Amino acid sequence: MSASAGAAREKGTMVRVQLRDIVLARSGDKGNNCDISVFAPDERVYEYLVKVLTPDVVKAHFGHWVQGPVERFEVPNVLALKFVCHEALGGGASSSLRLDNLGKCFGPGLLRLEIDFPADLLPGGDDE
């Protein structure tokens, strides 16, 4: 690692990343609701995401696509956060005029969210 790359990973240094650079996600639909599960690679990343990846952040990211509230459920035994986005699918599969895969598209959509993230938590950030 170069000296400048090492400096960028100093403890306390924050970098702007997309969620796709640090987590995995799966999503699906049930009626007019969408659920998204985000899986952290380790406990340190999970604990950070618990603090910053809130229902309000998820709702704001999707904007007008999510008409109802967003609920978050913490699943620490699998290092996951599950979000249920209510009134997110234009009425559901049989009612929606949307030409996409409904709930399946929300996982990849959430992975485009940019957050400030501790550089030392990035993969390889602590030179394990």
Image (cartoon, grey):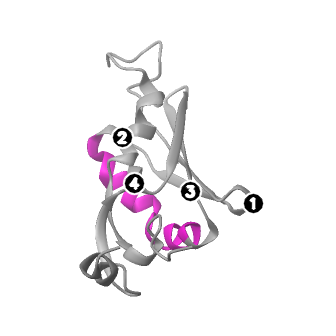
Q: Answer whether residue 35 is visible to the viewer in this image.
A: no
Point out the frontmost of discs 3 and 1: 1
Quadrant of the image for the C terminus?
bottom right
Q: Is residue 61 magenta?
A: yes
Q: Nearer the viewer, mark 4 or mark 2?
A: 4
Which amino acid, by three-letter code, is at mark 3?
Arg
Which mark sits nearer the N-terminus, 1 or 4? 4
Q: What residue type is labelled 1?
A: Asn
x then y, percent, for residue 57: 37, 60
- Residue holding disc 1: 77
Quadrant hosting residue 74: bottom right
Residue 106: x and y in percent read 42, 37
The quarter of the rendered structure image containing the N terminus is bottom left
| Closer mark to the observer between disc 3 and disc 2 | 2
Q: From which residue to which does the magenta span run?
A: 45-64
Residue lying furthest top in this view? 94
Is 54 included in the stretch rendered in magenta? Answer: yes
Q: Determine which residue is flagged by label 4.
A: 21
Return the residue at label 3.
Answer: 72
| 76 sits left or right of 28 in the view | right
Q: Earlier in the sequence, mark 4 or mark 2?
A: 4
- Neighbour class for label 3 at 10 Å: few (<14), some, many (≥20)? some
Name the residue tied to disc 2. Answer: 109
Specify few, some or many for label 4: CA neighbours under 10 Å numbering under 14, 14-19, or 20 or more.
few
